[in-house]
Image (cartoon, rainbow, N blue to C red):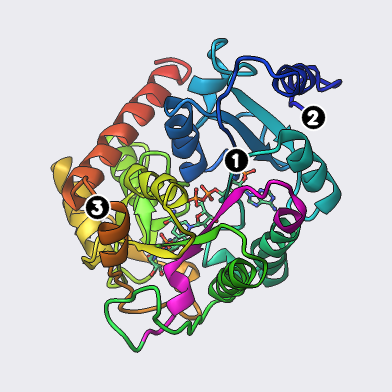
């Protein structure tokens, strides 16, 4: 049912147009997790490619969707080429009904509890959404005729403490977090369904990717936002966990290009998306605070609440297959990404200051 319209008029109208053989021959894509960082960039990309985009939104999601505002406020886009529908990943009946109605050509499955640290606090629901949610969707894919192409966003967390550096598509899974274990289950199920039921099902095995739309509790955005707030006198310190932690950090819009390219390939497969370069949390601090002429050592304090019970090491990806098969490579440099996020957060925080009473 189209959000904001109790009778689902928009989708009904659209379905009638489609099924009555209207001249609109656009491809249809479904995105689960459209309200998230990657979902919002992917929606933009697919709309630019001429797709009709159907986003699945969970019922408990906030009604404010800042990452999608520019699309949902555009009358030429929203309910014309972009449709939002409520469905939870636990609710197989609703998911099935939606997918049967929409008859998508491509399904991009991005939804899930995406915070690794939080997965230690809520392991059951993390596994239910991330592992079982993916399996439920695959069960629907099995029954759809014609069967859509399906992409699952897997994660470098499946490698945990890897024996092979850098990691590639065949590197064994050794997850060490509930999130990583759930993603590993889902990744294997995608491969099993591809082989057993001949689905066009692919895993995009993603290493960390960031942007100004990154959730505020991830370390990268936490740093760029805090640097901006400290610069403007809105915050005095930044509590962090392990600042020597290392990751392979890329730029989200680059990775979303990879998702699209993977579903356009001749045959279904899995691909790693990564930059191949490791950085430390410290590097984010140096660049973000340095860009604002601040010395991060004056503000950062250790807080054990942000120390993980287990934290993967040496997670760095080999994206050679994506390069060879899809011609994919990351475009934005690490430094340029950090600076873009700092500039974005400065603009947001300045606006906040301006809106404070008495200013
Ligand atoms: P976000 O956290 O920004 O977005 C997650 C999306 O999933 C949101 O739309 C969220 O909805 C939705 N969601 C969460 N739980 C449920 C649920 N129970 N039912 C339906 N929808 C739900 O993540 P990203 O965009 O960064 O990541 C997209 C996917 O890629 C995730 O699966 C993540 O695990 C995976 N991934 C991400 C990487 C990264 O570095 N960004 C790297 C590797 C994998 P709401 O807005 O309501 O919260
Ligand atoms: P990650 O990203 O766990 O890699 O998962 P996150 O930004 O949460 O942590 C990266 C590293 O920074 C260390 N760290 C802190 N992390 C957070 N969140 N907050 C802190 O205060 C802090 N201090 C230090 C962490 O210990 C860790 O080592 C992301 C998500 O997008 C997943 O969905 C995705 O699958 C993986 O990347 C690949």
Measured Cα–Cα span from mark 1 to mark 3: 25 Å
For the residue labelled by badge 3, is the local secondary structure a helix, a strand or a loop?
loop
Q: Quadrant of residue 304?
A: bottom left
Q: Does the beta carbon of the residue at mark 3 sit less than 8 Å from ligand 1?
A: no
Q: Which residues are magenta?
A: 140-162
Q: Is residue 232 above or below residue 201?
A: above
Please indicate, yes or no, whether residue 331 appears anywhere in the rendered image.
yes
- If the image is split into quadrants, where does the N terminus sit? top right
For the residue labelled by badge 1, is the local secondary structure a helix, a strand or a loop?
loop
Q: Residue at x 48, y 27 (%)?
A: 47
- If the image is split into quadrants, where does the C terminus sit? top left
In depth, the one of 250 and 18 nearer the eye is 18
Q: Earlier in the sequence, mark 1 or mark 2?
A: 2
For the residue labelled by badge 2, is the local secondary structure a helix, a strand or a loop?
loop
Q: Is residue 295 left or right of residue 158?
A: left
Which residue is tagged 2? 1
Which residue is tagged 1? 105
Please indicate, yes or no, whether residue 120 appears anywhere in the rendered image.
no
Which residue is tagged 3? 329
Residue 270 position within the rendered picture, expressed as x and y whole percent measured from the top left: 45, 65
Q: Earlier in the sequence, mark 3 or mark 2?
A: 2
- The local crowd at label 1, few if under 14, some if 14 to 19, many if 20 or more residues have their Cα within 10 Å, is some
Q: Residue at x 44, y 47 (%)?
A: 264
Q: Is residue 64 magenta?
A: no
Mark 3 and mark 2 residues within 8 Å of each other at the beta carbon: no
Q: Is residue 341 above or below residue 297?
A: above
Q: Is residue 147 magenta?
A: yes
Nearer to us: label 1 or label 3:
1
Residue 279 position within the rendered picture, expressed as x and y whole percent measured from the top left: 22, 65
Q: Is residue 242 left or right of residue 19?
A: left
Q: Earlier in the sequence, mark 1 or mark 3?
A: 1
In depth, the one of 10 and 65 nearer the eye is 10
């Amino acid at each position: 049912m189209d959000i904001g319209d109790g009778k689902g008029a928009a989708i009904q109208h659209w379905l009638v147009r489609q099924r009555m053989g209207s001249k609109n021959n656009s491809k249809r894509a479904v995105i689960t997790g459209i309200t998230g960082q990657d979902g919002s960039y992917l929606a933009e990309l697919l709309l630019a490619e001429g797709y009709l985009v159907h986003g699945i939104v969970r019922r408990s999601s906030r009604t404010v969707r800042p990452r999608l505002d520019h699309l949902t406020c555009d009358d030429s886009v929203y309910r014309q080429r972009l449709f939002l529908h409520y469905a939870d990943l636990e609710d197989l009946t609703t998911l099935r009904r939606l997918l049967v109605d929409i008859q998508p050509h491509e399904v991009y499955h991005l939804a899930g509890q995406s915070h690794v640290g939080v997965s230690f606090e809520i392991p059951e629901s993390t596994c239910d959404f991330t592992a079982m949610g993916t399996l439920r969707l695959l069960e629907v894919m099995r029954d759809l005729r014609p069967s859509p192409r399906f992409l699952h966003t897997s994660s470098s967390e499946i490698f945990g403490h890897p024996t092979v550096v850098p990691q590639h598509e065949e590197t064994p899974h050794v997850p060490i977090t509930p999130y990583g274990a759930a993603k590993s289950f889902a990744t294997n199920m995608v491969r099993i369904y591809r082989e057993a039921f001949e689905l066009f099902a692919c895993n995009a095995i993603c290493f960390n990717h960031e942007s100004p739309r990154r959730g505020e509790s991830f370390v990268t955005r936490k740093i760029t936002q805090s640097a901006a707030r400290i610069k403007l006198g809105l915050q005095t310190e930044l509590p962090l966990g392990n600042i020597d932690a290392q990751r392979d950090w890329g730029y989200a819009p680059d990775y979303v290009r990879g998702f699209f390219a993977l579903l356009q390939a001749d045959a279904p497969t899995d691909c790693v998306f990564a930059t191949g370069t490791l950085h430390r949390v410290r590097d984010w601090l140096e660049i973000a605070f340095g860009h604002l002429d601040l010395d991060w050592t004056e503000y950062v304090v250790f807080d054990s609440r942000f120390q993980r019970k287990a934290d993967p090491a040496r997670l760095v990806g080999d994206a050679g297959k994506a390069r060879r098969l899809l011609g994919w490579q990351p475009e934005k440099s690490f430094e340029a990404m950090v600076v873009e996020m700092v500039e974005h957060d400065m603009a947001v925080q300045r606006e906040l200051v301006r809106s404070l009473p008495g200013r």
